[in-house]
């Protein structure tokens, strides 16, 4: 199943960070730079979901590295070029222009490689902030609740829905199962995935 919003990565960056990609184009996670291979600075890439496709489709690349001088959780985006991509689909290898030797490559281990631009700009996505607060219904119109959060999972994002009774419901955010009507402010779930709670009878009516 295809993720509805893909793996569009959000990064908190320093206020003085300059990037040619604004909030509309976004950044897509390729993976985490792992073990160094050989003496010429190649690293194994521990893939994010859909990471290989992002690597192939992207035109511009960045390494996200923690910045001790920035607010907690912020990262500095360092532009880079992927000068070589090899290995296998299961264990890809990349060489970046930031590292020409084994020693400089070691310093990049554990950092995230991000892609932007190119064919990635044509991929459909929704910002997490656009989904929070949407009314969630079944395709038949039954009320399930309201989106309260979007959680990351290995295969795809998970919608956390707050039901009318306060209970929490988790739904997979994949296009085969849910659709977003942003104009109407409604997220619809295919019938049969989850049952809408029975409505309380109105005053004067008896429950059927």
Image: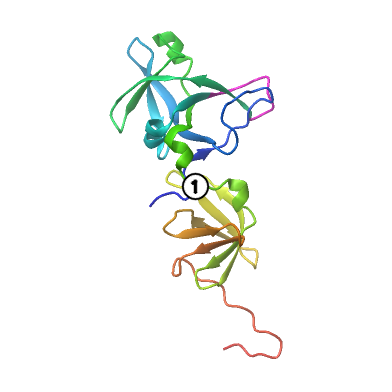
Q: Position of residue 134 (x, y in %)?
A: 62, 58
From the viewer's perspective, is 206 left or right of 138? right
Direction right: furthest residue: 203
Residue 59's image quarter? top left
Vertical position of residue 21 compared to residue 40: above or below: below
Q: Residue at x 62, y 21 (%)?
A: 67
Q: Residue at x 52, y 21 (%)?
A: 79
Q: Position of residue 14 (x, y in %)?
A: 66, 25
Q: Main secondary structure of the magenta part?
A: loop
Observer-nearest residue: 141 or 147?
A: 141
Secondary structure beneath disc 1?
loop
Q: Residue at x 48, y 32 (%)?
A: 117
From the viewer's perspective, is 162 left or right of 92? right
Q: Position of residue 144 (x, y in %)?
A: 57, 67
Q: Position of residue 162 (x, y in %)?
A: 62, 60
Is residue 65 magenta-colored? Answer: yes
Q: Quadrant of the C terminus?
A: bottom right
Q: Which residue is mark 1?
A: 5
Crowd around label 1: few <14 · some 14–19 · many ≥20 (10 Å)? some
Residue 176's image quarter? bottom left
From the viewer's perspective, is 34 left or right of 20? left
Vertical position of residue 151 compared to residue 195: above or below: above
Q: Which residues are magenta?
A: 64-73
Vertical position of residue 52 compared to residue 133: above or below: above
Is residue 51 magenta-colored? Answer: no
Q: Is residue 111 visible?
A: no
Q: Residue at x 62, y 60 (%)?
A: 185
Direction left: furthest residue: 88
């Amino acid at each position: 199943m295809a993720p509805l919003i893909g793996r569009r990565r959000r990064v908190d960056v320093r206020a003085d960070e300059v990037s040619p990609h604004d909030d509309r184009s976004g950044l897509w996670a390729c993976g985490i730079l792992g073990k160094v291979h050989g003496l010429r600075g190649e690293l194994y890439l521990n893939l994010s979901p859909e990471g290989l496709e992002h690597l192939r489709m992207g035109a511009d690349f960045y390494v996200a590295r923690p910045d001790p001088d920035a607010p907690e959780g912020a990262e500095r985006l360092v532009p880079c070029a992927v000068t070589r991509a090899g290995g296998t689909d299961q264990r890809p290898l990349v060489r970046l222009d930031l590292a020409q030797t084994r020693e400089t490559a070691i310093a990049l281990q554990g950092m995230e490689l991000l892609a932007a631009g190119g064919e990635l700009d044509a991929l459909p996505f929704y910002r997490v902030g656009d989904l929070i607060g949407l009314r969630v219904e079944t395709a038949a119109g039954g009320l399930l609740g309201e989106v309260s959060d979007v959680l990351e999972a290995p295969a795809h994002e998970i919608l956390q829905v707050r039901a009318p009774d306060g209970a929490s419901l988790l739904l997979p955010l994949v296009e085969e199962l849910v659709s977003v009507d942003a104009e109407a402010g409604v997220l619809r779930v295919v019938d049969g995935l989850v049952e809408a709670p029975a409505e309380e009878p109105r005053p004067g009516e008896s429950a059927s």
